[in-house]
Amino acid sequence: MKLKKSLLLSGAAVLALNGCYNEPGLVEDQSYDRTKTGALVGALAGAAIGYNTKGDDKGKRAAIGALLGGALGGGAGYLLDQQANEVARALGTGVNNDPLAALDPNNDIIVSKHPTYVKIMFRDKMMFPTDSATLRPSAKRKVEKIAHLLQRYPQTVVGVAGFADDRGSYEYNLKLSERRARSVANLLAVNGRPFVKGCSYNKPIVPNTNAKNRALNRRVEVYLYADRNQMTDPCR
């Protein structure tokens, strides 16, 4: 019964965090799923740890653990939600969580929110000249806008991955995709150098069967994590 009460308190923490931020704007996503998920997971974990700690009054410790865990977990999710909206606003676009958005060649930049990270996808055609890792001036300005925002979030962990199409050898595209990712990462190195990876032509958005599809697959993706331990391999 005491643990049940603690879990109810964890739900209250989620609801409290759910109403933290509600600034209107065309480019914002108000779902804040990461805030809610982070708060719930943190609260449940905190309640379990508190309840299983040795000593008297397990219910009280579980309740405290639930509140602290919910606050910490929800806080991390809230930061990701907030950053997604701020990045989208700075880049002049919206937060787009539609999985089909990447199939539209008109979407040069896609900002999307995921349970443990924010992803910014830059289409290759607006980033680099053919067979080059030198950023176009307009693309450089956009990446610098993200770098400026990250100065306000020193705790954010940044990852950058480059992706190529299947023209040429795997090894050549591996080096090109890594050099392109590094060009972007060098501008984002405001909180320490980001994690960089070249993916060659792994993880294509669509099969490399024609020129249109290959253009969709050439891209650089930037990932913003609240926790380094939640980072995953972008090439898989």
Image (spheres, rainbow, N blue to C red):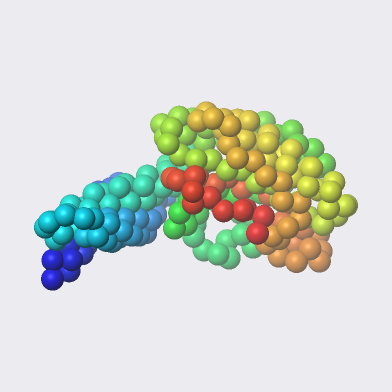
Q: Which quadrant holds residue 62?
A: bottom left
Q: In this view, does 112 lie to the left or right of 185?
A: left
Residue 108 point in image, percent of width and height = 63, 49
**Does 12 sit left or right of 186 as displayed?**
left
Quadrant where the image shows the C terminus: bottom right
Q: Is residue 229 above or below residue 14?
A: above
| Residue under the point 81% across and 66% down | 209
Give the residue drawn at x 87%, y 52%: 169
Q: Which residue is drawn at 64% across and 36% down?
A: 184
Q: In which quarter of the image is the N terminus?
A: bottom left
In which quarter of the view is residue 79 placed? top left
Q: Which residue is drawn at 85% across and 46% down?
A: 172
**Front position in the image: 34 or 89:** 34
Q: Which of 67 and 109 is in front in this view?
A: 67
Q: Can residue 9 be seen in this view?
A: no
Residue 132: x percent and y percent? 79, 38
User: Is residue 15 positioned above or below 179 on the image?
Assistant: below
Position of 35 relative to 83 (above/below): below
The image shows residue 214 at horizontal and vertical percentages of 77, 58
For residue 72, above or below residue 10: above
Q: Where is residue 164 in the image (x, y as percent from the top left)?
A: 76, 51
